[in-house]
Image (cartoon, helix red, strand yellow):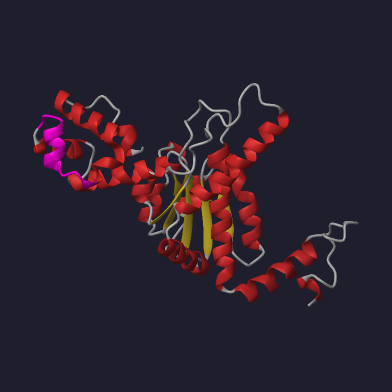
Amino acid sequence: MLLTEKMKQDLFSQAEAEIIKYMFEQRENIEDQTAKQIAESTYTHPSTLIRIAKKLGYSGWIEMKNIFLEEIDYLNSHFQDIDANYPFDANDNVMTVASKMATLNQITISDTLSLIDHNELQQVSALLNRSSQIKIFSQYNNLLLCYDFKSKMIKIGKQINLCVGDAYDEAMNCDADTCAIVISYTGETNDVTGVLPVLRKQNTPIIALTSIGENTLSRHADYVFRITTREKLYSKIGSFTSSNSITYLLDVLYASVFSVDYEKNLANKIRVSEHSDHRKSSNEVMEEGKGSPLSR
């Protein structure tokens, strides 16, 4: 759950609530304000700020303040002109709907990219390359998004298993040479979080794809990639941004693995596809010919 969502819960005394109200009113303006200044502005004591931080699970005021500012910065970016939950209106014609969906997809990719850390991506790329097998744990609807990832990874020689129905048994059969990719938008889905202690016990590295903010999945993971976090759980037209964000992240993971040994992986991918892909086309753009890598 986002810190900004936790702060809206009914957990606080009157003095604490005044500080939280002030933080939401001032937002990024509190960056240069000290605890003493905020306390004076809210007619409270600086120790009240520390109590709020402790109550929300943080070591101190500075840690909580920094996370609050990071979230505000994220929430201020990318989605000012479109609502991820209701990206089009009842009166929009079909071409307007199409245009708004294109805008939503473009913004989602930019938003997800902004959440990727260079060093973490580099480390995960190396991890995926050296792992003997990769297992993906998630709810069924997200696993459907993973089939293309699995297909692409198999063509460059990586062993991928989508764990459906028997996730606990799959987790029990993991080891330190296995890499687990665990996907959950909320990070709190029981079917997913239930395997996390097992994976930790098996010393299996965990890559999480989840929302921003602290949750059970992010706490257990060795590496965390953040899904665009703009959607409500169910009061929305569709899971457009979360699904597109997951798909993009999986494409990034595949591409980062591919790029480690580009020429070898390209040759392997083409060799496998040449024998398994029997499609034909009368469109010369699609036809394999002299201009394609297969002819080199």
- Judge by depth and name the residue closer to the eye, 98 or 219: 98
What span is in magenta? 32-44
**Residue 35 magenta:** yes
Classify residue 294 as left or right of residue 239: right
Residue at the location (67% across, 32% down)? Answer: 97
Residue 240 sits in which quadrant?
Answer: top right
Quarter of the C terminus within the rendering: bottom right
Classify residue 166 as left or right of residue 186: right
Residue 89 sits in which quadrant?
Answer: top right
- Residue 156 drawn at (x, y percent): 64, 67
- Residue 96 drawn at (x, y percent): 68, 32
* Residue extending furthest toward the right: 282
Residue at the location (11% across, 34% down)? Answer: 40
Quarter of the N terminus within the rendering: top left
Classify residue 8 as left or right of residue 240: left
- Residue 81 drawn at (x, y percent): 52, 36
- Residue 154 drawn at (x, y percent): 64, 62
Residue at the location (29% across, 27% down)? Answer: 9
- Judge by depth and name the residue closer to the eye, 156 or 293: 293
- Judge by depth and name the residue closer to the eye, 262 or 82: 82
Would residue 296 be visible to someone looking at this image?
yes
Magenta segment main secondary structure: helix
